[in-house]
């Protein structure tokens, strides 16, 4: 018994360290993004997020190698490994031996590692209330810093002190589902603070993500009267605040400009998508020059010249997976992601999920959405940690539902 207790303690340490690394990632990202928005002299500092990203991955690798000494696989893990081999072989055939070859290997192996780590994290998380409490505390701590940075950013921007009208820090997007899905009235209120701060940040992708997370949380709403009443009051306040901000401030200026450029007279799709549409067109044209690449991809190490820059990825992630592994890689990856997301939402709406399980399902939905707007899935271990947690939760609930049916 004593040996088992010590082993559990050893495991817990790694999980607490990972949560701390996640918070450090959020803090570093917030500070770096703020400084970058303040002055062009600090643009290069945004690359510092790679430090904590690598730290998260190292913690997961060390845990898998030296604590569990095995890697738990799921269907998506096997998909990544298979198409990793396809991409490597294609890259070798085209003799694309460069630094991006290694980056593409990272793109395909990192999700396997993080989802395996998530599996073991969940086993502890569901039993260890202290770990769950610690996770919520760290989410709230990061949110407080994030909120302060957004408020200061808005004040400075109104005074002409910032060079950019958006603060692209994702911490509010990460924290929001944990708080909105809680049964604690105080945490729910903080969840709406996360929603408000994310909106004030002015980042279009984050705005869409937090609104989607808010809608998903309402769909899985706990039917307790106090919880429902708080959500109703906060929703009414959120709608009123949104209307006020729209009429009296320029918070939504970028969103309005985007819609105008997409659908208004003299529409400019390039401006609306920040050049994403042009990037997609160029990559598609490149692949069309050799149609077999739709099946194999352009291979690891492959790059496409897009507006004075070689791109080894696409901001539209489904196309990015086509580039490296072929269309079947993209369809397989997104088919599994979407299937798990749909099942998770259904289980949540039917009341099969615990309040602490719902946030991971919502973050899975958000991971899919944000990957259509950027290359987040290819570079961000936290997303694959959340995805892995959602997968385990959905699989556990599928087993429970099946047992009930039998």
Image: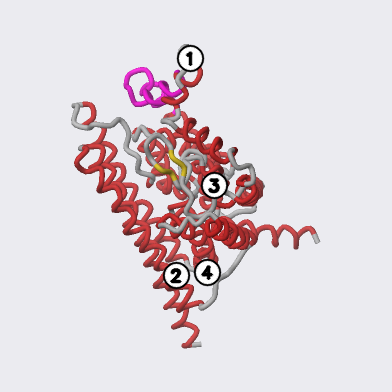
Magenta-colored segment: predominant secondary structure = helix
State the extent of the magenta-drawn residues as a range: 239-260
Position of residue 111 in the picture relative to residue 202 (left or right): right
The percent coordinates of residue 245 (x first, y second) are 36, 23
**Which disc, if any, is residue 264?**
1
Q: Earlier in the sequence, mark 1 or mark 4?
A: 4
Q: Is residue 357 left or right of residue 343?
A: left
Q: How many marks?
A: 4
Label 3 crowd bin: few (<14), some (14–19), many (20+), radius 10 Å = many
Q: Rounded to the nearest whole Å, what is the CA distance between mark 4 and mark 2?
A: 12 Å
Figure check: 53 above or below 250: below
Give the numbered dot on residue 323.
Answer: 3
Q: How far from the left and from the top, in percent, is residue 86?
A: 60, 58
Q: Residue at x 64, y 53 (%)?
A: 352
Give me the C-alpha separation between circle 3 and circle 1: 32 Å
Can you give x and y, in whole percent of width and height, for residue 388 in the image?
A: 54, 59
Question: What kind of colouring is applied to the model shown?
Answer: secondary structure
Q: Which mark is residue 120?
A: 4
Quarter holding residue 18: bottom left
In space, the residues marked 2 and 3 are separated at their CA atoms by 27 Å
């Amino acid at each position: 018994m004593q040996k088992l207790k010590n082993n559990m303690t050893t495991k817990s340490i790694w999980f607490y360290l990972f949560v701390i690394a996640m918070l450090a990632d959020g803090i570093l990202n917030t500070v770096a993004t703020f400084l970058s928005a303040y002055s062009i002299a600090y643009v290069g500092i945004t690359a510092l997020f790679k430090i904590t990203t690598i730290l998260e991955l190292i913690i997961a690798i060390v845990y898998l190698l030296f604590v569990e000494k095995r890697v738990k696989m799921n269907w998506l893990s096997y998909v990544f490994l298979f198409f990793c081999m396809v991409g490597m072989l294609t890259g070798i055939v085209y003799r694309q031996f460069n630094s991006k070859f290694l980056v593409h290997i990272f793109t395909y192996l990192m999700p396997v590692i993080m989802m395996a780590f998530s599996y073991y994290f969940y086993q502890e998380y569901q039993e260890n209330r202290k770990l769950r409490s610690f996770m919520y505390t760290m989410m709230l701590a990061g949110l407080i810093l994030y909120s302060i940075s957004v408020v200061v950013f808005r004040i400075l921007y109104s005074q002409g002190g910032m060079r950019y009208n958006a603060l692209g820090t994702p911490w509010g997007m990460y924290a929001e589902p944990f708080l909105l899905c809680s049964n604690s009235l105080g945490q729910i209120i903080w969840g709406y603070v996360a929603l408000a701060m994310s909106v004030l940040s002015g980042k279009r992708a984050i705005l869409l993500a937090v609104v989607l997370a808010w809608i998903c949380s309402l769909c899985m709403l706990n039917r307790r009267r106090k919880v429902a009443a708080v959500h109703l009051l906060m929703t009414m306040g959120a709608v009123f605040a949104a209307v006020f901000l729209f009429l009296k401030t320029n918070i939504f200026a970028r969103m309005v400009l985007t819609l105008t450029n997409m659908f208004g007279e003299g529409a400019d799709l390039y401006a609306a998508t920040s050049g994403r549409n042009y990037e997609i067109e160029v990559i598609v044209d490149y692949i069309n020059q050799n149609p077999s690449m739709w099946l194999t991809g352009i291979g690891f190490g492959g790059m496409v010249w897009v507006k004075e820059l070689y791109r080894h990825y696409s901001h539209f992630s489904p196309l990015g997976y086509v580039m490296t592994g072929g269309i079947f890689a993209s369809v397989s990856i997104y088919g599994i992601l979407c299937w798990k997301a749909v099942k998770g939402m259904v289980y949540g709406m039917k009341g099969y999920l615990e309040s602490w399980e719902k946030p991971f399902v919502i973050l899975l939905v958000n991971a899919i959405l944000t990957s259509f707007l950027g290359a987040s899935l290819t570079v961000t271990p936290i997303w694959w940690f959340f995805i892995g947690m959602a997968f385990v939760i959905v699989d556990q609930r599928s087993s429970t539902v099946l047992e009930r049916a039998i």
